[in-house]
Image: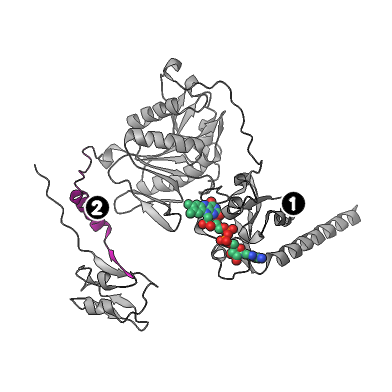
């Protein structure tokens, strides 16, 4: 039977707040059905009941201040329409939602120690599973890794799938891919989440490619669309200038990766139990071309561990030169913290990349983050905005860093930092005096 071609939905025009340049109501004049009124700021107000979606107002607007709005149902029809226009067939094997059920988290481990991002993902997965009314499962691959099962239950898994096999002792793409595919093809989870770590990025890409499904990397938000039960995968796009919400509408599973420290780690519930599925897996070693001869721990250019730091004192271009980072070092030492920086500081060669915070650096969540001379570009903010307490020092009162700061100090960092350091030294000296007096 021939499929009926979708009809393009009309939608309605919508004003993009703050973009109108008060050009003289060109949009109102262009509207053939009087669906636009101007408010007292000379901005358009669209009368939705009248708008026929002809887009004439969009075409005459010199500031691009109007856009088309489509309801979620209309968006689906529009996507189908655009596909039909482009001659792209809807996938023949589009899965039915009923076939694929459950939210799965990949528990990444190295030498039997789980990466904390796995537990953070179980926390995020719990909310998704609750909204979908389905089970939350963890899947663990490795050799001698069954001690991780109670940990997975404690962090929220209802069920744990395990493949415990010697070929999975060290991470290698091929055996981990085969083991993941075996589980996913057999049990058909609708959502699979992995950490955006070196291992997770490698495995998620390979699995998604083999299953011919979508994968959204480095998500900063995950939620369920109430209308159609789809996973809404939000992440920065176009160099971080917009936040895009991505859907995997027609393929399963819906796959996403999330960086460490982006989602909060749930509380551990000791003694919590669930069901365990121990899966047989057979892949002879001689069929795996990658051999691990020796594991040599990475000696990074710097030993800084930003991810685990409780206090980070970060500097940006406003530090003016590498020598001034001594100020940050002094403050960090007093607070028991480490030094971070913006990409500008790395690009200028002031600090190694291991110190960089942000989209292409580390995502951090310390108790205290002090940003000095950092403007707060979105690419920096995505890496530190979940810190428990943020202090920003910047001489520009309009710097975007202040939008995420709990305490903003407008002023010259070369005056503020020495004063802060002196105050802290004074404070510690007084504490020491008091404790000596007690002795
Ligand atoms: C794809 C992509 C990925 C990126 N990834 C990252 C990333 O991971 N991390 C990252 O940080 N950036 C990243 N960037 C770069 C980002 O867009 C910004 O360019 C960068 O964060 C700016 O660094 P900055 O704040 O140090 O410098 P600037 O934006 O130049 O800001 C310097 C600030 O210092 C202040 N200042 C100057 N002198 C003083 C003073 N004496 N006292 C107080 N304040 C002072 C100024 O007012 C200004 O706000 C990325 C960009 C792209 C396109």
Say if 96 sits above or below 237 in the image. above
Can residue 406 be seen? no
Residue lying farthest left? 1
Residues drawn in magenta: 65-93
> Where's residue 63, x and y in %?
34, 72
Can you see residue 398?
A: yes
Q: Secondary structure at mark 1?
A: helix
User: Ligand 1 shows up in which quadrant of the image?
Assistant: bottom right
Residue 81, relative to residue 49: is it above or below? above
**Which mark, by number, is residue 303?**
none
- Report the residue marked by disc 2: 79
Residue 43, horizontal then vertical, whole percent: 34, 78
- Dot 2 beta carbon under 8 Å from ligand 1: no
Residue found at the far bottom of this picture: 40
Q: Quadrant of residue 404?
A: bottom right
- For image coordinates 28% across by 64% down, the residue present is 69
The relative height of residue 33 versus residue 140 in the rendered view (above or below) is: below
Q: Position of residue 288 (x, y in %)?
A: 44, 20
Residue under label 1, please give it. 333
Check disc 2 and report its element: helix, strand or loop.
Answer: helix
Residue drawn at 86 percent across, 54 percent down: 435
């Amino acid at each position: 039977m021939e499929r009926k071609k979708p009809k393009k939905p009309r939608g309605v025009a919508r004003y993009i707040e703050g973009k109108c340049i008060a050009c003289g109501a060109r949009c109102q004049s262009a509207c053939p059905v009087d669906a636009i009124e101007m408010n007292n700021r000379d901005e358009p107000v669209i009368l939705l009941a009248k708008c026929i979606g002809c887009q004439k107002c969009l075409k005459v607007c010199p500031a691009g201040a109007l856009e088309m709005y489509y309801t979620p149902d209309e968006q689906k029809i529009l996507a189908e329409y655009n596909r039909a226009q482009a001659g792209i067939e809807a996938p023949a094997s589009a899965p039915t939602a009923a076939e694929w059920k459950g939210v799965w988290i990949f528990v990444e481990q190295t030498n039997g120690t789980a990466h904390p991002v796995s537990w953070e993902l179980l926390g995020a997965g719990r909310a998704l599973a609750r909204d979908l009314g389905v089970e939350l499962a963890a899947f663990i691959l490795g050799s001698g890794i069954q001690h991780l099962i109670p940990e997975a239950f404690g962090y929220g898994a209802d069920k744990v799938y395990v493949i415990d096999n010697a070929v999975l002792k060290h991470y290698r793409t091929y055996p981990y891919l085969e083991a993941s595919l075996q589980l996913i093809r057999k049990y058909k989870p609708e959502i699979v989440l992995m950490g955006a770590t070196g291992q997770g990025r490698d495995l998620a890409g390979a699995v998604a490619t083999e299953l011919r499904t979508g994968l959204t990397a480095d998500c900063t938000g995950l939620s369920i669309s109430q209308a159609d039960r789809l996973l809404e995968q939000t992440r920065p796009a176009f160099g971080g200038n917009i936040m895009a919400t991505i859907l995997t509408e027609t393929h399963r599973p819906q796959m996403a990766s999330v960086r460490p420290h982006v989602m909060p780690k749930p509380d551990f519930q000791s003694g919590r139990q669930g069901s365990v599925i121990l899966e047989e897996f057979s892949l002879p070693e001689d069929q795996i071309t990658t051999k691990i001869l020796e594991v040599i721990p990475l000696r990074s250019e710097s030993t800084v561990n930003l991810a685990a730091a409780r206090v980070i004192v970060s500097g940006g271009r406003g530090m003016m030169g590498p020598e001034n980072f001594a100020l940050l070092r002094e403050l960090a030492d007093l607070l028991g913290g480490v030094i971070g920086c913006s990409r500008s500081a790395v690009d200028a060669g002031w600090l190694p990349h291991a110190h960089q915070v942000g989209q292409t650096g580390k995502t951090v969540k310390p108790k205290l983050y002090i940003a000095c001379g950092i403007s707060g570009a979105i690419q920096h903010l995505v890496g530190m905005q979940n810190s428990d307490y943020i202090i920003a020092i910047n001489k520009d009162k309009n710097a975007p860093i202040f939008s995420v700061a709990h305490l903003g100090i407008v002023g010259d960092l070369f005056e503020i930092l020495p004063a802060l350091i002196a105050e802290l030294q004074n404070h510690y000296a007084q504490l020491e005096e008091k404790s000596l007096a007690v002795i």
